[in-house]
Amino acid sequence: MIRVILFVLLAAFMYSCKSDSDYSSSNTELKDAETNEQDSNANDKSSSNTINDKDADTILAPATFSNEGFDSALKYELLLETHICNPNYSDSVTDGSVPCSAKFFRFFEYNHKRTLNDAFMLQVKAGVNNYQYRRLLIFTRERGKLILVNGIRGYLVSQIKRPNEIDDLVVGVIDDLGSDTYERYDVLLRYKDGKYQVKEALGDLEGPFDSQELKNRATKMIKQRIEEKQLIF
């Protein structure tokens, strides 16, 4: 608890940490934002301020979900294989599970050396399985079985092409500070030794970290916070 308080105080000193309209001050409002397309798009517009939108090698990833269904049967089959959804869902279900639907899940590719069947990211809507935050789950196939490479409490902001054909990721990591207060850290992830790891902190709810010195200090603190609370695992 002391370390959390210290973190908040240091963050306030460094870059006036405070919440804004991207993340509401209550759990109810946070969930409502997940089900509202305009709020989701506003979140992503804010997050994209921390990267170069005009970079041809950067692909933005709006955190929206589809009401039209998946564009391929493969995505539905992969979703079933993850066991994260309920193929037998009905309105009478009360266990927090959801249908295997594009309304709750969105697929992204990240490894251009492998097909979607063998490597993909799954953006999961808040509320699925009674988990109140959005999650980004990264899978790869090994010996015929899907393996969870990373789990991230937050959402994908953008993908950046790399020479090794495995994209860097910019993600918005959600941190519950307690007392209905939330923070978001925009961090750069790079694939190394079989999983994604934090490379650098790029910004927070206040905007980008403008200097390299500030990035370095923030990266050290945010890495520690992520590890302590297992915001990326």
Image (spheres, rainbow, N blue to C red):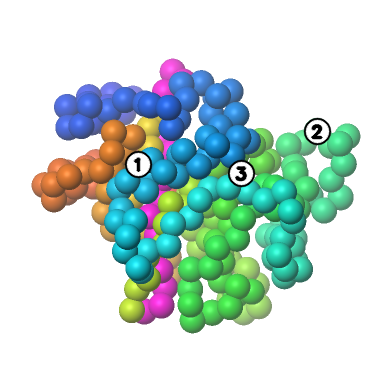
- Circles 3 and 2, Cβ within 8 Å, touching? The answer is no
Image position of 147 (left or right of 7): right
Query: Could you tell me what secondary structure mostly forms the magenta stretch?
Result: strand
Q: State which region is magenta.
A: 164-181
Residue located at (26% from left, 54% from top) = 200
Marks 2 and 1, the one that precedes in the sequence: 2
Mark sitting on residue 94 = 2
Quadrant location of the N terminus?
Answer: top left
Neighbour tally class for label 1: few under 14, some 14-19, many 20 plus, Cα within 10 Å? many
Mark sitting on residue 125 = 3
Quick check: is 172 in the magenta stretch?
Answer: yes
Going by the numbered disc 2, the residue's amino acid type is Thr
Marks 1 and 3, the one that precedes in the sequence: 3
- Residue under label 1: 185
Residue located at (62% from left, 55% from top) = 106
Residue located at (67% from left, 51% from top) = 66
Q: Nearer the viewer, residue 56 or 98?
A: 56
Residue located at (38% from left, 40% from top) = 46
Neighbour tally class for label 3: few under 14, some 14-19, many 20 plus, Cα within 10 Å? many
Q: Is residue 166 above or below residue 179?
A: below
In this view of the protein, can residue 150 be seen by the observer?
Answer: yes
